[in-house]
Amino acid sequence: MTLLDIENLRVTFPVDGGPDVRAVDGVDLSVETGEIHGLVGESGSGKSVTARSIMRLLDGARVESDRFEYRGEDLYAKSEAEMRSIRGDDVGMVFQDSLSALNPVMTVGEQIAEVVRHHGDVDESAGLLSELRRKYVTGTSEDAPSWRRAVDLLETVGIPDPASVATTYPHQLSGGQRQRVMIAQALGGDPSLIVADEPTTALDVTVEAGILDELRRLCDEFGVSILLITHDLGVVAETCDSVTVMYSGSVMERGSTEQLFENPAHPYTEGLLRSVPEGGAVDGELTTIPGSAPDPTARPAGCPFRDRCPAAFEACSDPLPEHAVDEGHVARCHLYTEGDDPGEVTWDGATDVDGAATGVAGAADDPGTASPTEVTDG
Ligand code: SF4
């Protein structure tokens, strides 16, 4: 069953004294119940703007679409009061920077308990005065159902000794623990969907693996759907059931993770995969795509990848087509006609990782520290 169904999303930011910036240009995105869907793209691809449009957290932007449905209802027809209850209750959000996202002067248990009370699952007042009293005078009693639920949630996300961790402040925890706290907080509203925006970017590899395992487990055991925003193809391969690849505000390809990794149908996806060490490297060499993404105020007509694509030809200045490669697998590229595979693209223009000044592989910027599976951060 489709939980989130977005069609032809356009997000435009007005700029004082300059041309408007179209950050997202005609994006289709759907998330099925109980799946992890990866939204992958490099800096400026519009993936985070797309994610924030789901929470209606884009102040000042013009958001237009042909369809924007959550559970079959138009999200943009909801009142602000209805949206407040959807945010945190039905749709939870996990941000990249946990230190900024969490309140530094409240214990983490208090912050999770607050979400639980607002969800209304416990018989405790969540009114403004009650919350102010709790916040500045009494704190939530450790016997209160919301506090007990907060401790349970910390345990659910794999925090050892959750009862004492609940009494700590965010700065007393490690980055990995704080990310787990944010996931627990998102779960406090008993959501159907969690939007996780680069939740592991700031973490080291072993901590990241633990968090990704946790997300996978929440999806498998509790049926929570997750929209995972990432620039890391390794994260997609390990965690996601399906994936949408974005570039410069547009969708390039979407399909199951297996379809995209085993049979990439779009030159951009293929270029990204060439930077993945296992299976992607050609003749043992990791490569990156030369050039950089276009300025969003001056994109080329037609395919935005045109200036970097080794297979570009005349028709690529026409509006992007949508070709079904296989069931559920779509590539937006002029090389394709229905059921006609143009074969592998020759990447003569691609340069090896060490030699590239710009490109999509994060390793190009710093081969010593960045994962070669990363798209340039964004
Ligand atoms: Fe874009 Fe054309 Fe290259 Fe396809 S072949 S990715 S449409 S530039």
Image (cartoon, rainbow, N blue to C red):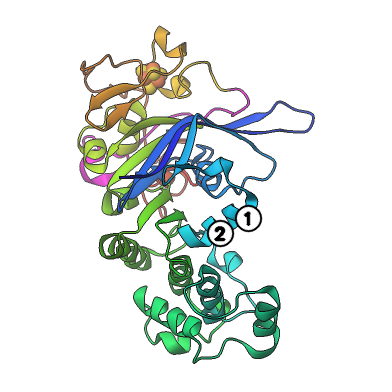
Image quadrant occupied by the N terminus: top left
Up-down: is 244 above or below 111?
Answer: above
At label 1, counting other C-alpha atoms closer than 10 Å, the crowd grade (few under 14, some 14-19, many 20 or more) is few
Place of residue 85 in the rendered image (x, y in percent of width and height, measured from the top left): 56, 59
Say if the magenta span includes residue 278: yes
Specify the segment rendered in magenta: 274-298
Give the residue drawn at x 73%, y 33%.
15
Q: Nearer the viewer, residue 350 or 120?
A: 120
76 left or right, relative to 157: right
Badge 1 vs badge 2, beta-carbon distance below 8 Å: yes
Give the residue drawn at x 50%, y 78%.
173
118 left or right, relative to 285: right
Up-down: is 160 above or below 102?
Answer: below
Q: Amino acid at mark 1?
A: Ala
Say if the magenta span includes residue 241: no
| Quadrant of the image occupied by residue 210 | bottom left
Up-down: is 371 above or below 338?
Answer: below
